[in-house]
Amino acid sequence: MFKTTRPLFLAATLAVTWMLPATAETPAPQESTFWATEVNAGNLPPIQDRLPSEPLVVDLAAKGRDFGTPGGTLRTMVTRSKDIRQMVVYGYARLVGFNENYELTPDLLESFENEDNRKFTLNLRQGHKWSDGTSFTSEDFRYWWEDVANNEMLSPSGPPDFLIVEGKPPTVTFPDETTIVFEWESPNPDFLQTLAQARPPFIYRPSAFLKQYHDKFADADKLKLHVDDARVKSWAALHNKLDNLYKFDNHELPTLQPWLNASSGKKIRHNFVRNPYYHRIDSNGIQLPYIDVVELEIVAPGLVAAKTNAGESDLQGRGLAFRDASILKKGEAGGNYKTLLWKTGVASQIAIYPNLNFSDEGWRDVLRDVRVRRALSLAIDRKTINQALYFKLAHPGAMSVLSASPFYDEANAQAWAQYDIKMANTLLDDAGLSERDKNGIRLLPDGRPMELIIETAGERQEVENALQIVTDTWREIGVDLVMRPLDRDILRNRVFAGSTMASAWFGWDDGIPQAHTSPAYLAPTDQVFLAWPKWGQYYQTGGDVGEAPDMPEAERLMQLAHDWEVATTEDERKAVWTEMLKIHADQLYAIGILNGAPQPIVVSNRLRNVPEQAMWAWEPGAHFGIHRPDEFFFAD
């Protein structure tokens, strides 16, 4: 789930073409020492035969960055084996991606054309290759569209939702080996932005590799041997198991990312080595990434700060929290690193999500009363939490967009966020919860004490510390907060099943939306918004699972999200954003506590081109991804 910048707004009335600025001459490419032995042995083509005919030339001087020298091993850490996928996030090789100004620009694509948000022409780079040397062409898009996304065995639910507009899929054509055209009858203004996400949809596949596991292309006897050898039930199960561009756990699967997985199986340390066919070079002709190897170590969550403090990571943000900043600062000299404090882009650092789809009918009715949600918010002492946990460096307030967004409204940011015990008690009395037990705890209409259980992922001490403070102030309004830490996956599954009364998590991933950003995450379109999992499931499955939204404001949010999709002007889309944010501020589907808490980023003193001031955000930005780690290098 769970910038004061100048974004590109893809005009709905004009055809827009984006491509790289023309250069007088592509610099002569230089062979890296890392692959020189393989080239000299004839196992790998020389650099000029590995690059596209027109590689993406990075002008580091224009970006205020230094030119680097290739080499070195970068050490970083994650806390779960599945998070080796962070190398796809950090690598941030996308068809189109956000630059440092949060503008959409071509990356893997040489250029793109947008006609009225209905027809998108994607132009590939001639001669671009996958990491195994096979060609990256329109056939990889055709294979995915026709033989994966529209194959019932591989994709039972059909193409992904972001490609379905007004219930209809696009017409997809492949005029030649470097051109792909997606065309809809109605506008699909979120198409390009979706391609730029931290977790991209991957509308292409390495077809040359995967065809050997597809029953349409593979020799039947060989395919049966593969299936038997993998001990799976069918060719489709095998194909899906191997087709893991995002999970990044199949070291044989070709990639377009700057580093490729060189480790097989489950390990404590995974090595990712530079992609010999990567499409980006600097203006001196040196192929990126500068860093040869990334060593990803899997450690227990509680050890990330300690090991970083000991100098065992060259670049670390994930697994660190603001509470670690002071100890990290103290360890800088001995660990040979510096500690930066980046801004964070989530809408709320800590948010409480009452589950409006909770399976307990009595509690569900209580949580659906907006007076109760407002009272709970008014009974939170945000200033004390800010002082105790963040030394007043965060911003107390409700969950809304951050000031860096053009949609920021101070009234929304402060709605029901003042500390007012008297008003909170009045609201709860008005909601029919005036009876209390001998301990002063309010009683539900059915006589049960108002023990509100908030489940957490148990990963961030700051959440538990904040909720402890909330526990004390909620007692003043007769609410007994019971905190229950769980494993992250268990927590999410319980929420999705309707078994969780309330949960604590971050706010919206994208707290800095721009005019071109889809507001779909403000509507019940996804189960991952923890206040309405069943409504999200209903939308995601076309009504097969979950429950239809049955509250007027939620129904209005769904209508507004649709209005944004079919809007033809920027003013219409701004109006949608404004109304949706006002509904959230009024209804408090998530009770935000504070935002803007600084994120510690630890950087080795040897590492260069890491920005001193930047935004740490999952969406948009892919954490380090938008800052282009392929341009980072070691000074020595």
Image: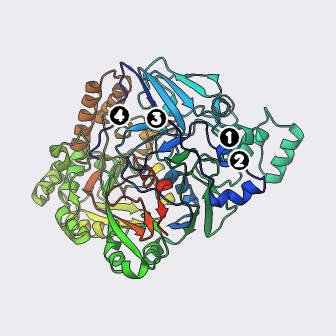
- How far is the residue under mark 4 from the one under mark 3? 15 Å
Name the residue tied to disc 4: 8
Query: Where 611 sits versus 540, above or below?
Result: below
- Side of 222 relative to 242 (left or right): right
Residue 542 visible in this rendered orientation of the protein: no
**Mark 1 or mark 3: whose residue is earlier in sequence:** 3
Q: Secondary structure at mark 1?
A: loop
Q: Quadrant of residue 213?
A: top right
Which mark is nearer the camera, 1 or 4?
A: 4
Could you say which is closer to the camera, residue 452 or residue 619?
A: 619
Name the residue tied to disc 3: 20
- How far is the residue under mark 1 from the one under mark 3? 25 Å
Indicate the position of residue 542 as horizontal and vertical percent values: 51, 31
Name the residue tied to disc 2: 132
**Mark 4 or mark 3: whose residue is earlier in sequence:** 4
Query: Where 282 sits versus 483, above or below?
Result: above
**Mark 1 or mark 4: whose residue is earlier in sequence:** 4
**Mark 4 or mark 2: whose residue is earlier in sequence:** 4
Marks 1 and 3 in Cβ contact (< 8 Å): no
Query: Where 528 sits versus 303, above or below?
Result: above
Q: Amino acid at mark 4?
A: Leu
Residue name at image x 69 percent, y 58 percent:
36
Which mark is nearer the camera, 2 or 1?
A: 2
Which mark is nearer the camera, 3 or 2?
A: 3
Q: Amino acid at mark 2?
A: Asp
Marks 4 and 3 in Cβ contact (< 8 Å): no
- How far is the residue under mark 2 from the one under mark 1? 10 Å
- How far is the residue under mark 4 from the one under mark 2? 34 Å
**Mark 3 or mark 2: whose residue is earlier in sequence:** 3
Residue name at image x 37 percent, y 22 percent:
566
